[in-house]
Amino acid sequence: MSVAYLLALSVIARDYKIIIENPFLFIIELLLMSILPGIPILFFVITRGISMEQAWIWFSSLSVKFAIFHVISQLSGFYTWLFSS
């Protein structure tokens, strides 16, 4: 439910400020927020004897999910609200 709420807010708020002002920083954030959470899962899957092909499929799908969540959170204004002083 919270993803649907953030998606609706991203359509309404459209907080593009950091994406327009500093696109390189946003890309770095996007890569870190999508790849880093999947690394422990990749390790667990590989050490439990799952095939490398299946592990990469799971890692990739998890990374895409985290990337989408990061973009939705940014566009909804959640990060602007969270880190405002």
Image (cartoon, rainbow, N blue to C red):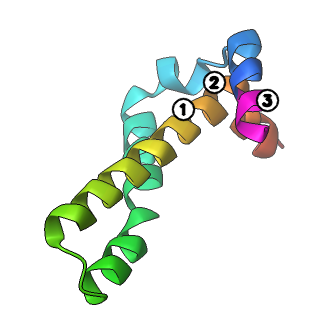
Measured from the top left, where is residue 83 in percent x and y?
A: 75, 45
In the rendered structure, which amino acid carries the disc numbered 3?
Answer: Tyr
In the rendered structure, which amino acid carries the disc numbered 1?
Answer: Val
Residue bearing the label numbered 1: 71
Magenta stretch: give its range: 1-6
Q: Residue at x 37, y 48 (%)?
A: 61
Q: Residue at x 65, y 35 (%)?
A: 73
Residue bearing the label numbered 2: 75
Distance Cα–Cα, label 1 vs label 2: 6 Å
Indicate left or right for 59 with 1 as reference: left
**Which tag is nearer the camera, tag 3 or tag 1?**
3
Measured from the top left, where is residue 69 in percent x and y?
A: 57, 40
Which SS type dominates the magenta stretch? helix
In the rendered structure, which amino acid carries the disc numbered 2?
Answer: Leu
Q: How many marks?
A: 3
Distance Cα–Cα, label 3 vs label 1: 14 Å
Which quadrant, please, contains the N terminus? top right
Res 46 quadrant in image: bottom left
Above or below, 57 relative to 23: below
